[in-house]
Amino acid sequence: MSEHLLRSASSLATLEPSRIGWGAVVAVLLVVFLSKVTKKSPNYPPGPPRDPILGNARQMTGDHIELRFAEWGKRYGDVNYLEVLGQPLVVLNSYTACKDLLEKRGGIYSSRPRLVLLSELMGYGDVLVHQRGGPRFRKHRRIVQDHFSAKSLVNYVSLQRREVYTTLADIGSSPHDFDRHLKRYDSLRTATILILSIAYGYNVRDCEDPLVVIADAATRNTVKAGGPGAMLCDMFPMLKYIPAWFPFAQFKRHALFTRELVFKMFDTPYQWVKSQMADGTATPCIAVDLLESLGAQSGPYDASKTIDEQDVLHIAGVLYAAATDTTGSFLMSFALCMVLHPEVFKKAQKEIDQVIGNDRLVDFDDQNTLPYFNYVLKEVLRWGCPVPLGVPHQLTADDNYRGYFLPRGSTVLFNTWAITRNEELYPEPEKFNPERFVGKMDSEAAHQVDAIFGFGRRVCPGKTFAEANVWLLMVNIVATMNIEKSVDEMGQPITPNPEYIGSFVRHVKPFTCKMSYRSEKARAIVEQTRLFHS
C-alpha cells in the first residue's frame, strides 16, 4: 500500500499546483509522514526514551551526568544509545565494552568529534589530545610516546626527585597550607617546572615566572568553559560565526580571550628555545631534539613522518598544556582519604617504617617492597575517580556490536565512574577499602581502575610518568608527615565532607586538615635530601 501511495504522490508532484488543489497537497504530506514513521528503525542499542527533535537533550542537563549514565547502564545494559538534537551518542558503561570497541576496533573508534569550542575557537586543534586522527595525529603520538617510554623516563628521575623533595619541605614549613602546596605541585611543579625543563630545557625561577603565569592563566580559563563538547556551539557549529559583540555570545568572547592565552602558552617557550639555539646556549630537551632534526630530513614531505615547525610547537606545548587537573584531583583525594581513614594512614606508615626505616626518604627502587601502600594508591584512584567520563571518541564507520547497529559519526563516551563502581569487582563500591586489592594487583579489578587513563590509541602517553610523580610524593608524605583533622575555635576536630565538584575533572570540595613533620628527625632528613638534590 505504501508503495502505491508513494507512486501516486510522485505523479501528483509533476502536476501544476493550481491543478492539484489543497487536498492533493495534504495527501502528499501525509504520504511523506507515513513513509517516515513506517520506515524500519535500525537496531540501535537500548537507551532511555527520546523526545521528538530534542532526543535525550533534556535528560543530559545538570551535574554529575556520569551517575545518570551509570543508572541507565544498570537499567538498559552496558552499551546505551542516545541522541542529542539528532546527533548520535553511544555511552559505554563497562570495561569489556570499552576494550572491545575502543581497543580491539581502535581503527574506527580513535577519532575525536568536532570540538568547536576547544579546537576551533580556543586554538587547541593541533594539540595531540584533541586531534581528530590521521597522519599528523599518528606522528605526534609516536614522538610523545618515544620521549615518555620506559627507556626515556630514566632521564627525568633526578628532576622528579628534586621537585618532590622541595614540595615536602614546603608542606613541612606551613602545614595548614597543604592544599596550596599540593595544587602547586600539580599545576606548577609537575605540569610546569618538570615539563618546561623536559620539553624546553627551561628552568623556572619561581611561581611568578612568566611561563608559569601564562600556563596557569590558559589552563584556568580553558577549564572555565567546561569539558570537551560541553558547549552548545559543539552541537551547532554555525554558532562559532556569531559576532563576539552579539548578545548571549559570552561563550565566544571568553573563547577568544582564552585563545590569546593559549597562543602565548605555546609560542613563548618555543620562541625562547629558538633564541637559545641561535645563541648556542640551549639545553638538551625535546624541542631542541625536534628542531635539530628539521635540517636532517630529506626526501618528499610525508605528513606521517616529516616534522615541521608546527609539529615542534604543538608537540612540546601539549606536554604541559594537557589536562593536568587530574593529578591535582588525585593528590587532594589522597589527602581526604587519609584524614577520613587514619587507620589506613597508620598502617601504610607502619609498613614504610618496617621496610625502609626512618634514616632516609623512600625512592623509586622501593616501590615493589611496599605492597600495602600500593593498595592504598590504587583504591584512592578508584574511589576518587578523577575523570568520570573520558575525552569523547568518534566512530568513523558504521559498526555492529552484539547485534546492535552503531552509526558512523557517533560520539562515544566511556563511563569510568561506572567502571570503577562495578559492584561485582568492587563490593560496597562507595566504601574506601584498600584491602580489596590485597593479592590482586595483577587481577581484573586492579586493571580496570586504569580506565581513567583512556583506551587504545587514545590512552594517556604520559601515564607512567604521572604515576611515578604521584607515587614518590605520596609515599614520602606518609613516611615523613602526620595527616590529621584540623580543629575549630573550640578545639573540636573538623571532619571533612567527602563531596566532589566538577564535570570533566572531579575535585574534592575545599576542606582543611593538618600535615606536619612526624619528628625533628624527619624534618632534618627532608631538608638534607632537598639540599643534596637542589
Image (cartoon, helix red, strand yellow):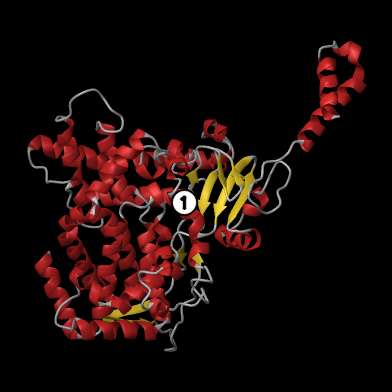
Residue at 26% x, 69% y: name it: 473
Q: Is residue 413 left or right of residue 123?
A: right
Query: Could you say which is closer to the camera, residue 103 or residue 471?
Result: 103
Q: Position of residue 225 (x, y in %)?
A: 48, 48
Q: Is residue 254 visible?
A: yes
**Quarter residue 324 falls in:** bottom left
For mark 1, does the 10 Å Cα neighbourhood hold few (<14), some (14 to 19), or many (20 or more) residues?
A: few
Q: Residue furthest bottom?
A: 491
Residue at 43% x, 73% y: name it: 511
Query: Could you say which is closer to the camera, residue 20 or residue 516?
Result: 20
**Quarter residue 423 falls in:** bottom right
Q: Is residue 114 left or right of residue 520?
A: right
Q: How many marks?
A: 1
Q: Position of residue 443 (x, y in %)?
A: 39, 69
Residue at 70% x, 40% y: name it: 41
Residue at 28% x, 43% y: name it: 142
Q: Residue furthest front?
A: 403
Q: Is residue 227 visible?
A: no
Tell me: residue 9, above or below residue 55.
above
* Quarter containing the C terminus: bottom left
Q: Position of residue 294 (x, y in %)?
A: 18, 31
Q: Position of residue 231 (x, y in %)?
A: 54, 45
Query: Could you say which is closer to the camera, residue 359 or residue 81?
Result: 81
Tell me: residue 358, above or below residue 320.
below
| Mark 1, residue position | 224
Q: Is residue 378 left or right of residue 239?
A: left
| Residue type, label 1 | Lys
**Quarter residue 408 falls in:** top right
